[in-house]
Amino acid sequence: MRDLDVLVLGGGAAGLMCAIEAAKRGRKVLVVDHAKRPAEKIRISGGGRCNFTNLNCSPANFLSENSRFCVSALKRYTQHDFLKLVEKHRIAFHEKTLGQLFCDDSAKEIIRMLLSELEAAGGALQLETEIKAVQKPDEWFSVATSKGPLRAKSLVVATGGPSIPKMGATGFGYELAKQFGLNVVPPRAGLVPLTFSDTNRDLCGRLAGVSVDAEVSFRKTTFREGLLFTHRGLSGPSILQISSYWREGQPISVNLLPDRDLFDFLRAARKETPKQDLKTALGALLPNRLVEELANAFQLKGRLADQSDKVLRRAAEQLNRWQLTPVGTEGYRTAEVTLGGVDTKELSSKTMESARVPGLFFIGEVVDVTGHLGGFNFQWAWSSGHAAGQVV
């Protein structure tokens, strides 16, 4: 039996950050993970370059049943704090759109940085270790593993959610929370492509590979970024963003021309070039493949001179406010994150500790806090891990 001050379950972004901070305080810390390599989500993120934070990070970029829960942790360890760590290790980075920060070279640099910090602080990492059972018979947590029993005064659960199961992701953290009597907000796939059936699926399939700048809305929430047609439906940043808000059976609205009132444009075109075909006019604004398919789907045909205001208004409505009802998502297989998780009502927003079970902490994706696309979920990992690391 090995006795520890802190045992961290999960060697991803949140778990490593927590372990680093705890070890800096002189705690005897061990991180265990079932994988062969640590931080696999970091490695594959951002096309292999890791969108490690966002300059514009704020609580408004997160979803949770308690929207205020994330405020404390994000305020005490900000994107600028993490950026200082990146600069300390001389990792070259660049800003893409909307404040997103990426490594110039490789996501592996972020992993090496974290492992270097953990080693320097005196923490340890143990891979290829399965958790068999977790109990708390007294003030210690007793954890049976495939590599022998462990005991710890503090147990930190940083096992993420079931998104991207091919990397070994599971719902282990939820089951552990339930074992100790904590409520779990039902999880679902987030930041995930939307799928369609019948006519709309066929239409999207014919347009697979076409991308446009679009504004996508669900109820009162709107995102404007790229939209990509796929063989199963719609993807791209704007769709991934809205997927976290979308609810089954409800329509989304797609504005394919967010910078233009199409009705005004078509009326002006009718006056200036009345002999021009409606499809030709639309071809000046959208990719030809998209115009061809939508012209057929919406019956957009004939010379502009022959179109009444009613017809032009209907065309504008169809392209500025295209109503589509998804049948579902591509699920955890391609989801970048998991929505829901351990209920924030069960945790301290300052320390991430369970109110029911002293010494039990939940951090990162396993908690019911989910960020927008663009580095926000990594920032939640850094911030929540840092918060727990100050007190475990």
Image (tube, grey):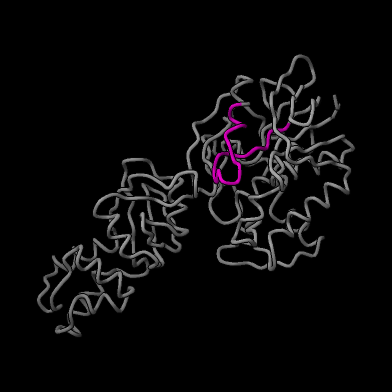
Q: Which residues are magenta?
A: 156-175
> How far across and how far down the image is residue 79, in percent?
69, 54
Front position in the image: 210 or 271:
210
Q: In the image, is 165 to the left or to the right of 29? A: left
> How far across and how far down the image is residue 174, in percent?
58, 30
Q: Quadrant of residue 386?
A: top right
> How far across and how far down the image is residue 356, in percent?
66, 20
On screen, residue 259 above or below 191 = below
Front position in the image: 126 or 64:
126
Say which quadrant the C terminus sits in. top right
Q: In the image, is 227 to the left or to the right of 349? A: left
Say which quadrant the N terminus sits in. top right
> How far across and how far down the image is residue 308, in percent?
11, 70
Q: Residue at x 70, y 30 (%)?
A: 131
Front position in the image: 371 or 235:
235
322 in magenta: no
Q: Residue at x 80, y 50 (%)?
A: 115
Q: Residue at x 75, y 41 (%)?
A: 127
